[in-house]
Image (spheres, rainbow, N blue to C red):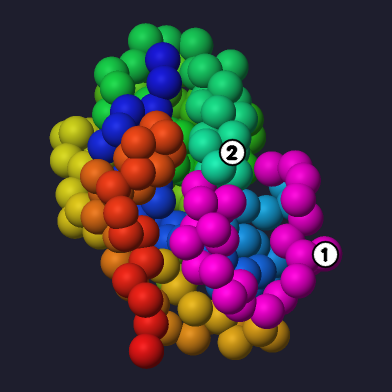
Amino acid sequence: MRVSTAGIVEIAGHEGIVPAPYLDSAGVWTWGVGHTAAAGDPDPARMDRAMPRNLDAAVIAALRQFKLDLAIYADRVRTAIRVPLRPHEFDALVSFDFNTGGIFKARLTRAINAGERDAARHFMGWVRPPEIRTRRAAEMALFRTGNYRANGDLVPVWRTDGKGRLRGIIQRMHGAELIGWLDGTPLPPVIAPQP
């Protein structure tokens, strides 16, 4: 099973695209679409922290890394879950693991594998820092209902201050644009020129 197109847009919408390294709400150096050193190289803590001059090229690089990271987390979910899943359930679990790295130790995983009737409630066992509660609720709802519209169809592209802090949204990318770039059939422009 692979992450669906709607699942890719949903995960990217939760994460956003940040073309320079920043400290996430837990104080972890992050870059691109939620990429941290836990997913492998490159290590965002060792990257140039300045906002890139060529935002299109930086977004494309971030999306290439996102595609690699998605494959890693999808494989982790396929390994951890031993029961059949619907596509939307799989997507919700990949989103969860992409954000937490906790698929192998979560009570959620044990409950799903045990066939617990309302296993999805265990998404809410991972709500630290508190800002993540909305995402967990959206993942739980996606798992239960297949509703992919937690973020609409827009993925924010964020600016940083060059010191690791987010400084506002530059642009919002439509899901179709994001998928086009991931599939190698871009729909221009990714980022409108800034004044």
First in residue order: circle 1 vs circle 2: 1
The region drawn magenta spans 39-63
For the point 55% across and 28% down, the residue is 71
> Is 26 within the magenta?
no
Q: Quadrant of residue 120?
A: top left
Looking at the image, can residue 118 be seen? no
Q: Residue 85: x and y, percent?
A: 34, 16
**Residue type (three-letter) at the residue carrying disc 2:** Asp
* Camera-side residue of 47 and 127: 47
> Is 51 within the magenta?
yes
**Residue type (three-letter) at the residue carrying disc 1:** Arg
Q: Are marks 1 and 2 in contact (CB under 8 Å)?
A: no
Name the element at disc 1. Answer: helix
* Camera-side residue of 176 and 185: 185
**Which residue is identified by label 2?**
69
Left or right, residue 47 beside residue 113: right
**Which residue is identified by label 1?**
46
For the point 36% across and 59% down, the residue is 190
Q: Residue 88: x and y, percent?
A: 28, 29
Image: 68 above or below 59 = above
Q: How far separated are the C-alphas under marks 1 and 2?
A: 18 Å
